[in-house]
Image (tube, rainbow, N blue to C red):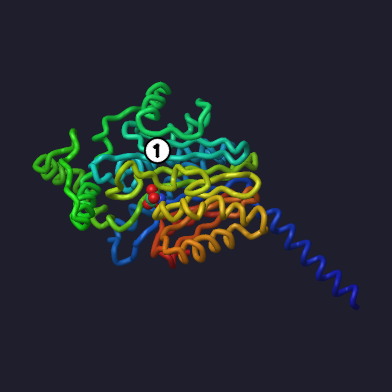
Amino acid sequence: MRSKVLGAVLAAVMVTMAGQAAAKPKWAIVVHGGAGVIERQDLSPEQDKAYRDAMAKVAGVGGEVLKNGGSAIDAIEASIKILEDDPLFNAGRGAVFTAEGRNELDSWIMDGKTLKAGAVAGVTRTRHPISLARAVMEKSPHVMLMGEGAERFSASQKLDQVDPAYFFTERRWEALEKALKSQGLPVPPRPKGAPSVPELRSSLQHDEGQERGLLAQIDKKYGTVGVVALDSAGNVAAGTSTGGTTAKRWGRVGDSPIIGAGTYASNASCAVSATGTGEYFIRLTVAREICALVQYKGLSLQAAADEVIQKQLTAMGGDGGVIAVAPDGQMAWSFNTSGMYRARMADGQPLSVGIYKDDP
Ligand code: ASP
């Protein structure tokens, strides 16, 4: 009798294990579009839909690359480029302004197979900072380039160069004015090449009107973008792109381009991309801490992400969130803000898109 029971238990365990093995996806992707104070009552149905559509589109584009056998790095670059072109997000076009009225962009990409990485900080003329980060990783002997030197390298790599005014959006300018006034700081002149206010008013009656309506109340949200991916060769990678924080000063650099803080990837543990107030993420080395908990303590990816975001970050008074993926196909997100724009999908698993805390 006892052996019969044991046999049945063993059989059940084996079925479960077989089920788990079968369920391990060949590829997986998780994307975020920033975390912050994002509550249902803040977003109109159109705004809600615009963000969900953007997240779904980007996960779909990255997922397609992975489905076709592309690398995690290719999937990340392809999907982040879309977000950098989308003024809904604080990355590329739509980036927030520094106190001096500039858009200074930070980006990072890391390959979990080789631990190769590339980062740029404070760039102002590269349309796709994620592609520049990738070029740093693949075409330079360095890991991180900043400012003017990064711009020169970007041009030498023939990456798409734009006038700094390309990144200008009116609502980010309004958010800057508001932030500076609340801090008692002077508002700089509108950047050269930005539409003048009368010009803007007439254009708002046309296509930008819709964009502005969609974005009317986003000044309390962050909007950094990030993607983590597992490819069918079993490699993980992570990428992040941001304009940083509104009214940042003195050449401030956030966590996004800092290894182990806002971004990290290693096949030995996981790949992470973060969003939130970078100063906290840097001091907690959030991305690396999550991977270390997976690697050395054997925590599940979700438990590790929750430990760092819900406990450590929260205890320190920091706000934000992360997305993560592991080489065995685990996917996770965790945030201590009221919302985070996010989506995930994997081989054999449907697309899931969320904004608010209580979204699945
Ligand atoms: N983490 C970014 C930074 O501090 C901002 C964000 O995620 O919203 O630069």
Q: Can residue 351 be seen in this view?
A: no
* Residue 141 percent coordinates (x, y): 53, 27
* Residue 114 percent coordinates (x, y): 62, 36
- Image quarter of residue 253: top left
The answer to which of 149 and 134 lies nearer the viewer is 149
141, above or below 220, in the image: above
The answer to which of 78 and 53 lies nearer the viewer is 78
Q: In this view, does 356 lie to the left or right of 329?
A: left
**Residue sticking out furthest to the front:** 250
The quadrant of the rendering that contains the N terminus is bottom right
160, above or below 232, in the image: above
* Residue 36 percent coordinates (x, y): 37, 59
- Residue plotted at (45% across, 47% down): 226
**Element type at marker 1?**
strand
Q: What type is the residue that disc 1 sits on? A: Ala
Q: Is residue 181 left or right of residue 269?
A: left
Which residue is under mark 1?
A: 121
- Residue plotted at (35% across, 33% down): 127
Q: Can residue 47 be seen in this view?
A: yes
* Residue 106 percent coordinates (x, y): 39, 40
223, above or below 142, in the image: below
